[in-house]
Amino acid sequence: MKTQPQKDRIIIFDTTLRDGEQCPGATLNVDEKLVIARQLARLGVDVIEAGFPFASPGDFEAVSRIAQIVGTEEGPIICGLARSTRPDIQAAAEALKPAAHGRIHTFIATSDIHLQYKLKKTREEVLAIAGDMVAYAKSLIDDVEFSPEDAGRSDPEFLYQVLERAIAAGATTINIPDTVGYTTPAEFGALIRGIAEHVPNVDQAVISVHGHNDLGLAVANFLEAVKYGARQLECTINGIGERAGNAALEELVMALHVRRQYYNPFLGRPVDSEAPLTRIDTRQIYKTSRLVSNLTGLLVQPNKAIVGANAFAHESGIHQDGVLKHKLTYEIMDAQSIGLTDNQIVLGKHSGRNAFRTRLKELGFELSEQDLNKAFLRFKELADKKKEISDWDLEAIVNDEIQQA
Ligand code: KIV
Ligand code: ZN
């Protein structure tokens, strides 16, 4: 059954269309959400959190259409978010009806800060609501995920009780959010280990993690969590999301891909197993990143890991010389593995003779050593004045300096 996956594989739960869309200025209309959902299905995510149906009629429609069109029998699980209230849960169940595999994701905060200032409820009340609302969701749909919001700042003993209650009420996924991106990798790993050890019925559910990037630690926290039993990672394309964003899907997936031998034993696999740890088709990553950036209008910073414009670009002469001799010298993954055609050698003031000669050759210029030296001097002079030297510049240098000599 789709809702009970193997425990030696990592489930990728994409929340670009829900938490990602909560990023200021990133609002998407129904058609745009559908286009992204289709691409997420091609990317191979296991779960698409398509929206928050109670939040607006538009979001209800988006979840419903994605459920109908993308949530086919072979397609991903389609998920809708709901606070722990009956109207929210009802709306989610209604919107998810067309999906072959639907999931309600319901949440309530468990930290004392949230209980005191936001919910104005006691721990006992929250415990009862969590159990009741998971049971209610379960009466409407088979696949229920429960999140104790702000788990990262909750008292672990209380957290264990809430999680036990949610699982007993029918939650098949328990998601542990670091809602405000406060925890460090060691703390987050210890939190997951504590849950795996102290929640008596934890074996009846998949442990999931959800985290924000306020301190830039979300991906590191998740990777630590995997070591202690987390098997579902909630993430977004390009790491977009509330405030500083969510854990970035592309970073998590490529970390698990590039370092699979390191993570295999934590998933109970032999160290030398080369089997992928997720179902993601990594060659779709770049395309998905561009699509999300274009439709949300959120630009990707050039030095962003995996999908930034510079992630596979080399500028310095030493690095260029290295990768031209063998890519492994300065690359830990192939540009092709995320769907790019190749890495990029950028010619600038730090570039060396080898990269210069190689690019000229690609442009059809085979120069004598003497001509190459002259052209290289001109190139360096120009590079001191310009950030990047284009192919036009190179052609001008060669035509002007060499061929007329
Ligand atoms: O950050 C958070 O706590 C959330 C929950 C709704 C899972 O997004
Ligand atoms: Zn969140």
Image (tube, rainbow, N blue to C red):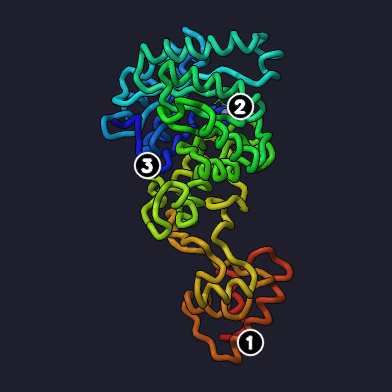
Q: Which residue is mark 2?
A: 151
For residue 365, above or below residue 289: below
For residue 324, above or below residue 301: below
SS at mark 1 in the image:
helix
- Mark found first going from the N terminus, 2 or 3: 3
Quarter of the image containing the N terminus? top left
> Disc 1 residue type?
Asn
Residue found at x 44% / y 39% = 12
Q: Which residue is mark 1?
A: 373
Q: Position of residue 240 (x, y in %)?
A: 57, 37
Disc nearest the viewer among 2 and 3 = 2
Residue lying farthest to the left in this orientation:
73
Q: Position of residue 277 (x, y in %)?
A: 41, 48
Q: Position of residue 268 (x, y in %)?
A: 41, 48
Front position in the image: 173 or 86: 173
Residue found at x 26% / y 30% = 73
Quadrant of residue 345 within the rendered picture: bottom right
Front position in the image: 318 or 215: 215
SS at mark 3 in the image:
loop
Crowdedness near tag 2: few (<14), some (14–19) or many (≥20) residues, C-alpha within 10 Å: many
- Whether the residue carrying mark 2 lies under 8 Å from ligand 1 is answered with yes
> Disc 2 residue type?
Ala
Describe residue 101's horizontal placement relative to residue 210 as left or right.
left
User: Marks 1 and 3, how far apart in space?
Assistant: 50 Å
Describe residue 167's horizontal placement relative to residue 41 as left or right.
right
User: Marks 2 and 1, how far apart in space?
Assistant: 62 Å
Q: Which residue is mark 3?
A: 44
> Disc 3 residue type?
Gly
- Mark found first going from the N terminus, 1 or 3: 3
